[in-house]
Amino acid sequence: MAIFNRDSEDEVARGARAVVVHAETHGGDRRDSDARLEEARGLALAIGIDVRAAQSFRVRDRKPATLFGSGQVDQIATLVNQEEAELVIVDNALTPVQQSNLEKGTGAKVIDRTGLILEIFGERAATNEGRLQVELAHLDYQAGRLVRSWTHLERQRGGFGFLGGPGETQIEADRRMIHDRMAKIRRELDQVTKTRGLHRARRQRAPWPVIALVGYTNAGKSTLFNRLTGAEVMAEDLLFATLDPTMRQIVLPGLDKAILSDTVGFVSDLPTQLIAAFRATLEEVLSADIIVHVRDIAHPDTEAQRDDVLDVLSELGVAGEGAVERGDGEADPPPIIEAWNKLDLLDTESAAQAREIAARHDDVVIISALTGEGVEGLQRAISSRLTRGARVHSLRLPISDGAALAWLHEHGEVLATRPSEAEMQVDVRLSDSGLARFLKRDR
């Protein structure tokens, strides 16, 4: 059962008239106010909401009842009336009490940033696993709220959370239904996780490295993925264009084969429910040999976006102090290369400055995934990092094992071969991870 399947009733929601508001708290956000509003507008447009106006309000102290001050709530209500809006999107996290009071104060349905992101994920998830993960996150989000309607749990229909329904009846029964459904989904996801673990173990035995693309939503990961693989993964100027991970085989300098994985984009204030629900998918990054962090270097908040991505990676145990032991037994997390994307959007002076900064860092490459500029340099950087630390190993192979010798020629640098009657001794330059793959390969 999926709660996000649309029926004819819900088509109206895609064109819902809305205003977007954001509470700027003192020292609470390092982002540019206009960029923050523009991102919120983009999130709303991603699910077809008709954004009529967007406005920020400075909030000295968060009001427990409404978040905004009483005068600001009146201003929002006036904005709703002027724009004939049906919906208020608050680009902050709201408590259930704040959401309810704002609805009373503005006379419109209210949805917060978390709810909006959940709606986008619900519409975009394409695989069964993705739909289960989103539904679990949505149910977890709603479980603590006085929900107006959970009829979709009974009628197998979906819809936007802000549409409402017949009334606040049988709340305890609804909550029981929610928790029962969550338990069922978790059991299904546990099975999916086990299957994914088997696939991951099989890939780790394969003789080629895995490269994971990560980055802020709309940073250009899918465009780069298509550029490197020749695939046609959905790549639009749209937030969260990619949800379900996609993998393709690629060729890199000095490496005949590698696996490239495109992952879901991150965003500031990513709902904790989503991080938890998508952990199995995101942990694919843990098994990668290298992470390419794609950044929109032309965005005014590129540094803040970088920090948001690293925060999520740290929470997953991929980067920072929370790094965990990798699936292949190595204690170190995978190395990260930053791909500073959208060079084509920078003016001449800004591009020169970016190049100057990047030149001072070994793990930064400037590219334009759209035009292809710098992509070859990125490929060389990935290949160089994957083969870094290669050492000469002396291996003894059965004289008849031509497949093993071919593997070593393909994935390493064979320096010498000394055959005898029963075996051959091969001196080959390989990285430690390459040697591990050779020893674990399918024979």
Image: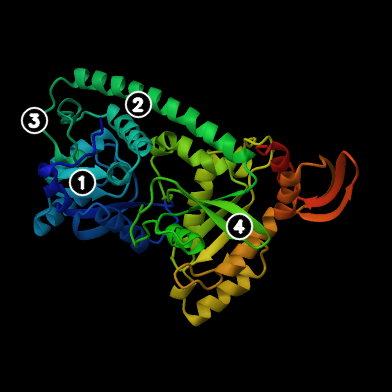
* Residue at mark 1: 70
- Residue for point 43% across, 65% down: 299
User: Considering only order in the chain, which callout, 3 or 2, is on the residue closer to the N terminus?
Assistant: 3
* Residue at mark 4: 337
User: Considering only order in the chain, which callout, 3 or 4, is on the residue closer to the N terminus?
Assistant: 3
Q: Quadrant of residue 322?
A: top right
- Residue for point 72% across, 42% down: 438
Q: What is the three-letter code of the residue carrying label 3? A: Pro
Secondary structure at numbered mark 2: helix
Q: Is residue 432 visible in the rendered structure shown here?
A: no
Measuring from the top left, give residue 220's x and y in whole percent: 44, 61
- Mark 1 or 2: the one toward you: 2
- Residue for point 63% across, 59% down: 382
Marks 3 and 1 sit apart, C-alpha to C-alpha, by 29 Å
Crowding at dot 4, Cα within 10 Å, few <14 / some 14-19 / many 20+, comes out as many
Marks 2 and 3 sit apart, C-alpha to C-alpha, by 26 Å
Q: What is the three-letter code of the residue carrying label 1? A: Ser
> Quick check: marks 4 and 3 in contact, CB under 8 Å?
no
